[in-house]
Amino acid sequence: MGGPNLEVFKFGMYIMFPIAIMYYFGTNLDNRFSVHGFWPAPEQTNKVPFEKDEIHAELERLKSKRLEKRDRRLAAEAQMNGQAGEE
């Protein structure tokens, strides 16, 4: 059997191995595991309006966008119905 030196070595390995793994994977994470361009830039993210005027302006923008899409859809449906009636 091994002696006390072997037991001290094993104890040291049991203690140091997890610490070494945590140190290796825990340092310099931004450079080691980062993917360039993964997260959107701040100017590309949604900005939630908090002021009353900003909220109303955003609601008006969304309403006009929805109505514009509705008008295009209705025009496309009318065109499809007109083509279907000619056949």
Image (cartoon, rainbow, N blue to C red):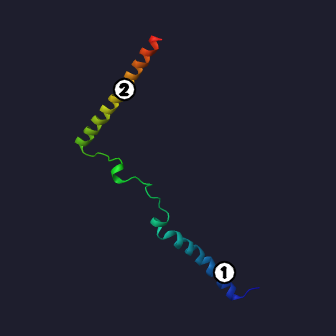
Q: Label 2 belongs to which residue?
A: 72
**Residue 8 at x, y percent in the picture:** 65, 85
**Residue 7 at x, y percent in the picture:** 68, 84
Check the picture and name the quadrant holding the N terminus. bottom right
Three-letter code, disc 2: Arg
Q: Secondary structure at mark 1?
A: helix
* Vertical order, 57 against 9 (above or below): above
**Residue 84 at x, y percent in the picture:** 46, 14
Residue 11 sits in quarter: bottom right
Residue 85 horizontal side relative to residue 72, left or right: right
For image coordinates 41% across by 15% down, the residue present is 82
For image coordinates 66% across by 81% down, the residue present is 10
Q: Residue furthest top?
A: 86
For image coordinates 45% across by 65% down, the residue present is 30
* Vertical order, 22 against 75 (above or below): below
* Vertical order, 41 against 15 (above or below): above
Residue 3 horizontal side relative to residue 44, left or right: right
Residue 20 sits in quarter: bottom right
Residue 32 horizontal side relative to residue 66, left or right: right
Question: How far is the residue under mark 1 from the one under mark 2?
Answer: 74 Å
**Residue 2 at x, y percent in the picture:** 74, 86
Q: Residue furthest left?
A: 53
Q: N-terminal of the two: label 1 or label 2?
A: 1
User: Could you say which disc has been placed on residue 10 in the image?
Assistant: 1
Mark 2 burial class by Cα count in 10 Å: few <14, some 14-19, many 20+: few
Q: Residue furthest front?
A: 87
Q: Secondary structure at mark 2?
A: helix
* Vertical order, 43 against 22 (above or below): above
Q: Which residue is more in the foreground, 72 or 3?
A: 72
Q: Which residue is more in the foreground, 54 or 44?
A: 44
Question: In the rendered picture of this protein, how many numbered marks are placed on residues?
Answer: 2
